[in-house]
Image (tube, rainbow, N blue to C red):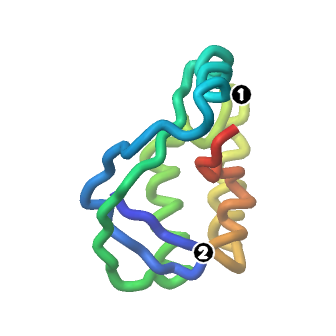
Amino acid sequence: MELVDAEGRRWQVLSVRPVKRVGHILTRWAKDLLTGVPQFQVEHELNQLSRLTLPQVQQRVCEAMEAHPEFWCDDGYQADFPQRLAEVGRAPTIEAIHEVLGLDTFESY
């Protein structure tokens, strides 16, 4: 897996392992009960790779979307798919691609 930030810097993920549970024990218990998703602090090992340009990121995103259109369009919205691809291609920044697609930031809820 690769991670790419808003400036096009990228890293290959070599390993990820949980270190410890996050939060006070009562807070953890309540969150686990309500969401069923425990939160962990993780330790990861990354290998820095060369930067990607905006056109390279746009191409990768469009290729991923075309390979799995079911992830990017709800049932009944297949007609909007070409428009979303075009919006990715017109995005002026990598951050704008995130805004077009409404990507999750993997934050704790």
In this rendering, position of residue 69 left or right of residue 95? left
Indicate the quadrant where residue 70 lies.
Answer: top right
Front one among 57 and 67: 57
Tell me if mark 2 has few (under 14), some (14-19) or many (20+) residues whose alpha carbon lies within 10 angstroms of its own: few
In this rendering, position of residue 102 left or right of residue 64? right
Residue at the outermost front position: 25
Residue at the outermost top position: 33
For the residue marked with disc 2, what is the amino acid? Ala
For the residue marked with disc 1, what is the amino acid? Gly
Residue at position x 67%, y 20% from top? 30
Indicate which disc residue 76 carries: 1
Tag 1 secondary structure: loop
Residue at position x 68%, y 17% from top? 34
Q: Position of residue 92 (x, y in %)?
A: 71, 79
Q: Position of residue 88 (x, y in %)?
A: 65, 65
In the image, is residue 70 above or below residue 16?
A: above
Residue at position x 32%, y 51% from top? 16
Q: Position of residue 84 (x, y in %)?
A: 69, 54
Q: Earlier in the sequence, mark 1 or mark 2?
A: 2
Location of the C terminus (image quadrant): top right
Discs 1/2, front:
2
Location of the N terminus (image quadrant): bottom left
Residue at position x 65%, y 24% from top? 26
Tell me if mark 1 has few (under 14), some (14-19) or many (20+) residues whose alpha carbon lies within 10 angstroms of its own: few
Q: Which residue is mark 2?
A: 6
Q: Position of residue 71 (x, y in %)?
A: 55, 38
Residue at the outermost left position: 14
